[in-house]
Amino acid sequence: MKVRWTGGVRRLAMAALVAAVLVPGAAHAQGKITGKVALSGAAPAAAKLKMDADPVCAAAHPDGAAAEDVVVGSGGGVQNVFVYLKEGVKGTFPAKTDPAVIDQKGCLYGPRVVGLQVGQPLKFTNSDQTLHNVHGMPKVNAPWNFAMPKFVKQKENKDLTKPEVMIHVKCDVHPWMSGYVGVLEHPFFAVTDKDGNFTIEGVPPGEYTVEVWQEKLGAQTAKVKVDAGAAAKQDFTFKPS
């Protein structure tokens, strides 16, 4: 039987073919990975931070401030855990042009943990009316160390050219200030929220190794399969150190 193509049908067929070839994910819908990172048992007591050496820092926390190395929310969820696809990612991904931003506010880093792609700028801002000194201590990338007096409100580091998990950042003026940066060749990463939840969006179908990293509790990995257009779920549980 001979199929007769009308003009409208032909145009629709061609549009579908072009979309499948040119639009990423049109032929195979991308999925995502969701989950929660939790702590089993009682959370360790947070140490009190001594900020009296800098009156500006002390004034920002009239009721005192606690260390943020392990922050546990509702249901035992752990905040500030870096979650990323460690193995299984294929292809190349252009770096985002917008910088990842860490603010210095109340003499603390916010957010404490960030992720970015190789070649993406990392910006530090200063919301405090005091001097900070931003000291990055990578083992693979080039280290950095620069002062940010109260009148210097932002600086960028554009030299993170290699993947590295994780880079420790500290302030040489205020020894309690600590943060961490994860640098990856791809955009498939997340940082857990206040309740320990995370979502990695836009993941192509495939099998991956997912790693979660926490500065005090260590790291864990799991194998995760992502189906086209579906959400894969993977939870992690740490024991108190």
Image (cartoon, helix red, strand yellow):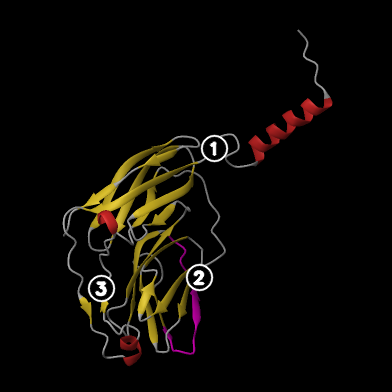
Mark sitting earlier along the chain (2/3): 3
Q: For the C terminus, which image quadrant?
A: bottom left
Q: CA distance from mark 1 to mark 2?
A: 33 Å
Classify mark 2: helix, strand or loop. Answer: loop
Mark sitting earlier along the chain (1/2): 1
Q: Position of residue 84 (x, y in %)?
A: 38, 52
Whether 23 is among the magenta residues is no
Residue at x 57%, y 40% (from the top left corner): 25
**Does residue 33 appear left or right of residue 68 in this picture?**
right
Classify mark 3: helix, strand or loop. Answer: loop
Which span is picked out in magenta? Answer: 147-162
Residue where numbered disc 3 is placed:
67
Q: Which of the two marks, 2 or 3, is nearer to us in this view?
A: 3
Residue where numbered disc 2 is placed:
158
Q: CA distance from mark 1 to mark 3?
A: 42 Å
**Does residue 53 appear left or right of residue 230 in this picture?**
left
Residue where numbered disc 1 is placed:
29
What amino acid is labelled 2 in the image?
Answer: Lys
Q: Which of the two marks, 1 or 3, is nearer to us in this view?
A: 3
Prevailing secondary structure class for the magenta stretch in the rendered image: loop
Q: For the N terminus, which image quadrant?
A: top right
